[in-house]
Image: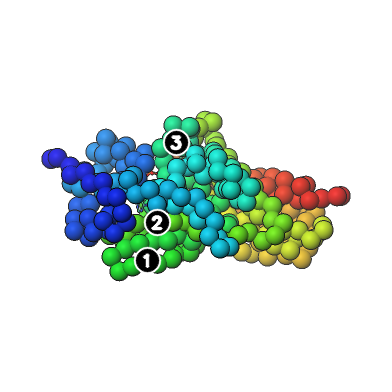
Amino acid sequence: MSTQFHQPETIPEALELLTQHGSDAKVIAGGTAVVLMIQQKLIAPPVLVSLAHIPELERIQTVGGEIRLGALARIRDVAQSSLIRDRLPMLAQACGEVGNIRVRNQATIGGNMAEADYASDPPAALLALDASVTVAGPDGTRSVPLSEFFLGFYTTALDEAEIITEIVIPTPPDGARMTYHKFKSRSSEDRPCVGVAALAVMDGETCSELRIAIGAASEVPVRLPTAEAMARGRVLDDSLIGEIADHAATKIDPLDDLRGSAWYRTQMIRVHVQRALLELRNEFSTL
Ligand SMILES: Cc1cc2nc3c(=O)[nH]c(=O)nc-3n(C[C@H](O)[C@H](O)[C@H](O)COP(=O)(O)OP(=O)(O)OC[C@H]3O[C@@H](n4cnc5c(N)ncnc54)[C@H](O)[C@@H]3O)c2cc1C
């Protein structure tokens, strides 16, 4: 069976094609996931709708108090953008650690979100940054907080005829420090076994805000509000960091797969939350 290949040049044109072809149509962006699935005969879409010729989807920009990533921005462009490196360094780190340079050159940030593979890096960083996803569909545009976007394995809140147009990130609080720790259990280019994204705002030695998101350890990336609350208004000393890391490890129901057993992932969550918080604390500390 031959596949029709469409290359719309505007968002409305793309949406029109998706509506017209319904479940026969598959969006393709960088193609790093879609092409593999076709080659492995996991999918055989009769119609491919490429977003590659819609230049407005490629922008990385600030608009008002927000940083906006066009869905078609390449993972490598996000990692290397001076705006992202200056303002959202943990996102630059997470994108800079995706696969290898060939993957980063081709894969898009929108494709990474839409694919919703649990073993991914950018989603945990974006969750800790309180990002939302802008989705365009036949009935208009809507904004979905990232905390409501991932529904399960390879499943998102996207409807059939919808596309992601942007990922929107509010400016982080003044003075926020942030880091992303990717733990790989098999090879230097592997997907994460566990990813820890952490952001801290300090007032002297006292932590006024802490955010922690864990990726790749469960079906969807998760924020840890109870662990975050443990730090608020307290001196982030070694003992508190140890308590928060222990607590964080109990809050995830980890997966068991080729990258690590559930028990191992629990230990790695504890270790990497501790390392991430020590790193953030030591950047501020005069102790
Ligand atoms: C060898 C290899 C190693 C990898 N290692 C890592 C890693 O370490 N960390 C990591 O995070 N990821 C990793 N990945 C995954 C990679 O990041 C994703 O495959 C990539 O980001 C998907 O983007 P894409 O543009 O290629 O998507 P595509 O393959 O074009 O599409 C992927 C899915 O998203 C849909 N889609 C794409 N764009 C949109 C849109 N704008 N709106 C709606 N739906 C859309 C498609 O229909 C499809 O279902 C790896 C992939 C490979 C091949």
111, 232: nearer the viewer: 111
Residue at image mark 1: 141
Task: Specify the quadrant that holds the N terminus.
Answer: top left
Q: Residue at x 23, y 59 (%)?
A: 16
Please give left or right for residue 16 compared with residue 86 in the image.
left
On screen, residue 271 above or below 64: above
Q: Judge the density around disc 1: few (<14), some (14-19), many (≥20) Cα neighbours within 10 Å.
A: some
Give the amino acid type for the residue marked by disc 3 in the picture.
Asn
Please give left or right for residue 149 compared with residue 195 in the image.
left
Alpha carbons under labels 3 and 2: distance apart: 19 Å
Mark found first going from the N terminus, 1 or 2: 1
Q: Position of residue 263 (x, y in %)?
A: 56, 46
Q: Secondary structure at mark 2?
A: strand
Q: Position of residue 60 (x, y in %)?
A: 50, 50
Residue at image mark 2: 165
User: Mark 2 vs ligand 1: CB under 8 Å?
Assistant: yes
